Structure formats: C-alpha cells, structure tokens
Image (cartoon, helix red, strand yellow):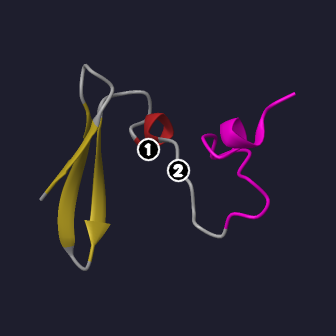
C-alpha cells in the first residue's frame, strides 16, 4: 500500500485532499529530459538535469 506522502508524488494517483495540480516531470518530458511550456505566448524550457533536479528557463 502506498503512503500518503508517496501518493502526492504521482500524478496518476494524487492525494485526495490536494487541490494543487501535480504533474510528473518524466511524463511532461515524454521520457526525455526537456519539455516546452507555454504561458501567455512565452515559451519556457523545463529541463531535468543529470542530478535529477529541475531547471525552468525562458
């Protein structure tokens, strides 16, 4: 059985009380290490580093 803390880390099984959207970065990057995110006609790049950290740049 998955602990409540673990459920918050999986977009396909969010914590029931959570109202904040939760997205899996691996899914956003389609298994790669980068994804583009659009906000108000601006394109941002989300990158997963070799160390497993996230970087968001404009």
- Does label 1 or label 2 sit earlier along the sequence? 2
* Crowding at mark 2 (Cα within 10 Å: few <14, some 14-19, many 20+): some
16 is higher (above) or lower (below) than 9: below
Left or right: 41, with 10 as reference point: left
* Image quadrant in which you'd find residue 3: top right
* Crowding at mark 1 (Cα within 10 Å: few <14, some 14-19, many 20+): some
Identify the residue at image location x=21%, y=76%: 41
How many numbered markers are drawn? 2
Quick check: marks 1 and 2 in contact, CB under 8 Å? yes
Q: Residue 4: x percent and y percent?
A: 76, 43
**Residue 28: numbered disc:** 1
Does residue 17 show up magenta in the picture? yes
Q: Which one is in front, 28 or 9? A: 9
Q: Quadrant of the C terminus?
A: bottom left
- Nearest-to-viewer mark from 1 and 2: 2
Residue segment shown in magenta: 1-18
Q: Residue 57: x percent and y percent?
A: 14, 53
> SS at mark 1?
helix
Q: Quadrant of the N terminus?
A: top right
Q: Which one is in front, 8 or 35? A: 8
Q: Which residue is mark 2?
A: 23
Q: Residue 2: x percent and y percent?
A: 80, 31
- Magenta segment main secondary structure: loop
Identify the residue at image location x=74%, y=45%: 13
Identify the residue at image location x=63%, y=46%: 11
Left or right: 20, with 25 as reference point: right
Q: Residue 45: x percent and y percent?
A: 21, 50
Q: Residue furthest left?
A: 58
């Amino acid at each position: 059985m998955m602990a409540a803390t673990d459920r918050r880390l999986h977009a396909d099984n969010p914590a029931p009380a959570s109202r904040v959207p939760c997205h899996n970065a691996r899914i956003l990057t389609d298994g790669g290490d980068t994804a583009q995110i659009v906000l108000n006609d601006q394109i941002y790049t989300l990158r997963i580093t070799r160390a497993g950290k996230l970087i968001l740049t404009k």
